Image: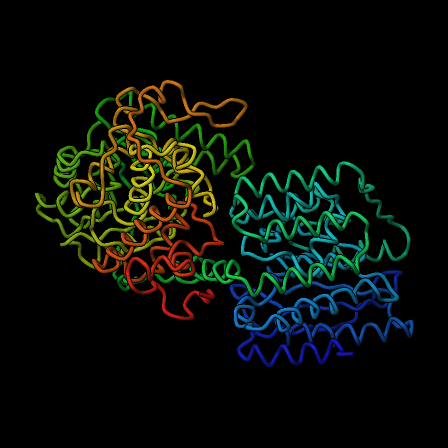
Amino acid sequence: MTTTTELLKGAAELFPDEVVTQAHVRHLELPGAGTFALITLDNGLDHTKPTTFGPQSLANLNAAIDQVEAEAKDGKISGVGITGKPFIFAVGADLKGVELLKRHEDALAIGKGGHDVFKRLSGLAVPTFAYYNGAAMGGGVEVGLHCTYRTVSKALPAFSLPEVFLGLVPGWGGCVLLPNLIGADRAVSVIIENSLNQNKQLKGQQVYDLGIADAIFEGADFLEQSLLWTASVLKGDTEVVRADVDRGEAWDQAVQRGKAIADGKVHGAAPAAYRALDIIAAAKNGDLRQGFDAEDQALADLIMGGELRSGIYSFNLVQKRAKRPAGAPDKSLARPVTKVGVVGAGLMASQLALLFARRLEVPVVLTDIDQARIDKGVEYVHGEIDKLLLKGRVNQDKANRLKGLVTGHLDKAAAFGDADFVIEAVFEEMGVKQQVFAEVEAVVPEHAILATNTSSLSVTEMASKLKHPERVVGFHFFNPVAILPLLEIVRAEKTDDASLATAFSVAKSLKKTAVLVKDAPAFVVNRILTRFMGEIQNVIDEGTPVETAEKAVEPLGLPMSPLVLLELVGPAIGLHVSETLHGAFPDRFTVSPNLAAVVKAGKRGFYVYDSGKPELDPEVKALLKQGDSVLTEEQVRDRVLDAVAQEIGLMLDEGVVAEAQDIDLCLITGAGWPFHLGGITPYLDREGVSERVNGKKFLAPGVASVPA
């Protein structure tokens, strides 16, 4: 039989570039509780390089457990603890290594290796303790679940089992141990619901409230307090009491809730969530060995599948490429921004004012055509700050400071005379925006950046009548501004490097994912979505039932159906963008007469909602005028994907962005495109659409590591 050491040694040969985590053992004397062995996980790098578990790292932890196991048998220690370096506990498997695996048996070995090491912590002759001192994700959470007791820091910023989000299952004990610790329903929330909600993170208090941790302490002296608590437990002064887990109907209901969540998010198109739920369902009997075997098999199957490869590709986009935007000028050229002006005081403008105030913490001034609008905009911002105060996101002093930063003024000269950055968010009409920019240019300092939040209009044309068009940039946010990370930064024909560098600097301060985009109609996200939506509307206009057109793209696992998305965007905005793109590319973009009729009728969407479920609005149904060409779901899907592949190919030929990866990054961060698709281009490559339409794949071999 292959030993754990041999298993890990073989796996380590596949990961030559692993960033190795050490497992340092030191001994402490606990008050009245004897000698205690503390294992510290540390990769020797600063806190920006989180600790991970590759094969050699697991081997190091295994060796540390060898040591403390012998000490426990000899009666030399009373307990064993495990913690991390400052700010980091551990963030799971080394994904760089996982994507290198090519054989099912190698993937299986990784799953077994993690289990074999971690489960030793529950088999020692003395109690074991995990001290979640900092960020803990994936395998970092799971190693703690194998311990007898757990504590968590109140300052812990991020705790999650993100595997389903990436296309895996929590495969080192998470699917089995967590529901057996806190109950199936809470486990489903952590493993399925949070993961599929864009990898939602838990804070320290939430970890404790869920029952994952047995005690919680302040961050400043977390380890010291955890060790004192440990001594109390070992002496018998503190008894840890946990709630009984309901293994009856509630367990089954939790699994069904998880399946409903998965169906709503991925529509059966991605297997990871369903594999995780199968393991959770089987874990009801409490058989850990059976559960661990199921985790190993699921992990191996999913590692070899396209979903994980796409998930890792997506992860690398948002974690790496997003931090080094392609084509961005040298950041040393950026000018400081000490005051921001916002032209407009409507909902979008007010959201922008709030964001600038919170992230830059500089004065922000709104203007509009009358005082009532300005007052309403400022009132909105102040109201949102009050909500942050009530939620404990800011304290009273911070709330007061933020409110004081946001003001309004009717006079643009008084408002913007000393502004460094002015952004307009007014009606989407070229003449209006040109007039606004002319008025602003006349009163701002010569160094001030003029930014537009246009979603589809030409930034070059907008700047064409100005004395200094070189300082105009596109700064296109996505709604809701506070949630969606993407910021399309548009370089117009005459935008200079200093203005562009300043725009990227501001975007970074706003904590947005900035992508450099050429000044082309509708830029990236809106152009692709409009082509996508346009084909859906075309097949409906031609005669395909609305339900068939909507269901056709469910296998993509998009966060919402096309017509629900249209409702979120607003039919009038959707119509406006389609008209803009039809004007630029009349051969490919159409203007749906049915959509125009819906907008003319003042309808906010195609659906009405009965008990939360969308149903075609009878009034909209009466408006629809359809032909007699009826397509099947497969035909609709092929037509839509062919159109999208064609449009992306043309955009890359035009140089709208630097590479296909930037299109994927835009769709993931600006349109909620699923991680398991890798954006869109890996999916089109994998399904053969790219080659069918364009004669070649979008991504070079190995870029996305997605099997053909």
Name the one closer to the observer, 643 or 11. Answer: 643
Q: Quadrant of residue 455?
A: top left
613 sits left or right of 249 in the view? left
Tell me which residue sits at (66%, 48%) in the image: 277
Q: Which quadrant holds the N terminus? A: bottom right
254 sits left or right of 238 in the view? left
Tell me which residue sits at (52%, 45%) in the image: 266
Residue 101 rendering spot, x and y as whole percentages: 56, 72
Tell me which residue sits at (62%, 42%) in the image: 259
- Using the image, determine if residue 688 lies above or below residue 64: above
Residue 588 rendering spot, x and y as whole percentages: 22, 45
- Using the image, determine if residue 607 lies above or below residue 117: above
Residue 512 rendering spot, x and y as whole percentages: 39, 50
Name the one closer to the observer, 174 or 491. Answer: 174
372 sits left or right of 241 in the view? left
- Using the image, determine if residue 30 lies above or below residue 459: below
Q: Which quadrant holds the C terminus? A: bottom left
Name the one closer to the observer, 367 or 418. Answer: 367
Tell me which residue sits at (57%, 43%) in the image: 262
